[in-house]
Image (tube, rainbow, N blue to C red):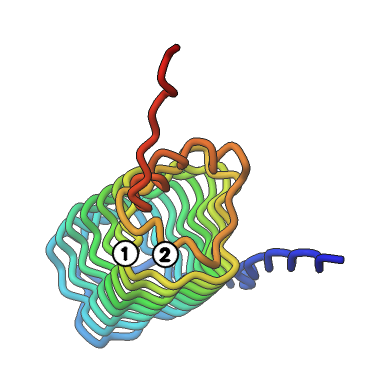
Amino acid sequence: MASQARAVQKPRLPEFRLPELRSYAGDEFAADAEYDELEIADRDLSGQNGRGARFMECALTRCTLDRTTLRKARFIDCALTGIRGVGTDLAETLFRDVELVDARLGGVQLHGATLERVVVRGGKLDYLNLRGSELRDVVFEGCVLVEPDFARARLERVAFRDCVLRRAELSGARMKDVDLRTATELDIARGLDCLSGAVISPFQLIDLAPAFAAQLGVRVEDPPVG
């Protein structure tokens, strides 16, 4: 008798409760600075340099992060809500126990980043660069991801729930317990052969069948008549 397939492991969700926060009184981020128990709201932080900064138990709300540098920063036990940004540099950044809600981001650099127990809920992320990143216990829920780049990334216990995944780059990605079954749109540009370790629905398999055939070099044609 064939053994039953192993159940997909669900992501572990962020576990934090923000304390009473103090309003951020500063004007600009500083490199390698520490920001603890702060509410940073309705700020235009465009072009600022917070490289290597640490954000602990903070809330960033309705902030603009156009071309803001936060490379190698650390966000721990944080809520980021309604942030906007184009070309934000978050490469090699650590996100642990973080909620990102209703963000609208374009061309964000997250290559080499580490995401642990992160929920991305709502919003739209265009051209998200996650090359070479580590994603563990991450949920994308109700959001739109346009041309996300997961090349050479490692994804473990990652779920895409009721979200759009359009023209995704998966080349060289490694997956374990990646659940794509409830994605409302699943469009893979490259890297179909890297879906090992992911689970898709029967309907998604039908939609992806032409791409799988092309990957294998199989021609699909109608039978001859007569």
The residue that disc 2 covers is 194
- Left or right: residue 166 compared with residue 2: left
- Left or right: residue 77 compared with residue 82: right
- Asked if 219 appears above or below 79 in the picture, the reply is above
* Residue 174 vs residue 36, the one in the foreground: 174
Residue at the outermost top position = 226
Q: Position of residue 154 (x, y in %)?
A: 43, 74
Quarter assignment of residue 16: bottom right
Q: Are marks 2 and 1 in contact (CB under 8 Å)?
A: yes
Q: Is residue 195 visible?
A: yes
Asked which secondary structure carries label 1, the reply is loop
Residue at 61% across / 45% down in the picture? 201
* Residue 110 vs residue 147, the one in the foreground: 147
The residue that disc 1 covers is 171
Residue at 21% across / 62% down in the picture? 88
Q: Residues within 10 Å of mark 2 (few under 14, many from 20)?
A: some
Instruction: Name the quarter where the C terminus is drawn.
Output: top left
Instruction: Name the quarter where the N terminus is drawn.
Output: bottom right
Q: Position of residue 116 (x, y in %)?
A: 51, 75
Residue at 30% across / 77% down in the picture? 112
Q: Position of residue 62 (x, y in %)?
A: 35, 50
Amino acid of disc 1: Ser
- Asked if 54 appears above or below 49 in the picture, the reply is below
Earlier residue among tags 2 and 1: 1
Q: Which mark is residue 66?
A: none
Q: Residues within 10 Å of mark 1 (few under 14, many from 20)?
A: some
Task: For marks 2 and 1, give the CA distance.
Answer: 7 Å
* Residue 67 vs residue 162, the one in the foreground: 162
Residue at the outermost front position = 226
Amino acid of disc 2: Cys
Asked which secondary structure carries label 2, the reply is helix
